[in-house]
Amino acid sequence: MVRKVPHILKSELVRVRQGYASHLGLRSEQQDVFALSDFSDAEFVSHGGYLALVADGIGGLQYGAEAAGIATTRFMADYTTKSVEQSVDDALDQAMIEANNAVCNTARYLLNCPGRMGTTLLAALIYREKFHWRSVGDSHLYLCRGGGLTQLNPDQIFARQLQILVSAGIINQSYADKHPQRYALEGYLGLESLPAVERNWQAMPLCDGDKLLLCTDGVYGVLSAVDMLACLRLEPKSAAQRLCDTVLLRAQPNQDNLTAVVLAYQM
């Protein structure tokens, strides 16, 4: 069977440049994993776009590094074998389901119990002149545009429930801010039932010069928006490395693993 590849119009051609950097920090094991599709594969790009993934294995559970690796590998494999006819949104949704199943199946094999190994997973896709994203957990996706930085995905952490209680007048803000479980993950891959997947419901148009930053909490937990913007003024490869270097220069005690992936869009 001959697969029909859609004709690529000149107006649909985009240039996406990428950069990435990762560091162990002061931890004994690297539990961050990232992956990128083949940006030079014009045939796949024509119907699948440019995909970047970042995952952060959960250290409080078992096999965090393995969970992150399994999730990114399965997601990438599933998405990059999408058919020409399948929409990118459907392919992203299916890949997230398969990634969760893969982590759960491994937990059953290693631990005889799903839910005891897990990982965050963040996917950003640039397709033609727009981008799509999916997120489970608390890895961050930022849009850098016109000198500003906007976080696009919400954190799936207990703080969200605390804020609901604050709004209802049940607890005060000070109590919520100091709650010891404030940053506990509510959603991650590895749960028997896939948690709610955060996403954009409509493809978001990109502007010339936009940058996307995917990063783990080892980066955003240390750097301010001003710090990140200063790094993102550079080209993607230099920007990603500068983000990690800036974190390490802060010399935080027990610095977590840190990973940054930068995508730059140029019309």
Image (cartoon, helix red, strand yellow):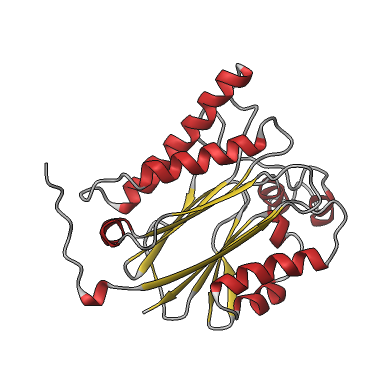
- Residue 38, located in which quarter of the rendered image? bottom left
Q: Is residue 196 visible?
A: no
Q: Is residue 153 left or right of residue 209?
A: right
Q: Is residue 91 left or right of residue 133?
A: left
User: x, y percentage for residue 204?
Assistant: 40, 67
User: x, y percentage for residue 33?
Assistant: 59, 48
User: x, y percentage for residue 73?
Assistant: 48, 41
- Residue furthest to the right in view is 253
Query: Which quarter of the rendered picture does the C terminus lie within?
Result: bottom left
215 and 140: which is toward the camera: 215
User: x, y percentage for residue 158?
Assistant: 69, 44
Query: Which quarter of the rendered picture does the N terminus lie within?
Result: top left
Q: Residue at x 31, y 56 (%)?
A: 48
Q: Residue at x 40, y 73 (%)?
A: 206
Q: Is residue 32 left or right of residue 39?
A: right
- Residue 6, located in which quarter of the rendered image? bottom left
179 and 172: which is toward the camera: 179
- Residue furthest to the front in view is 40
How many numbered marks does the figure carry?
0
Q: Is residue 20 visible?
A: yes
- Residue 106, located in which quarter of the rendered image? top right
- Residue furthest to the left in view is 1
Q: Residue at x 69, y 30 (%)?
A: 62
Q: Residue at x 25, y 48 (%)?
A: 86
Vertical comparison of 240 with 85: above or below: below
Vertical comparison of 9 with 24: above or below: below
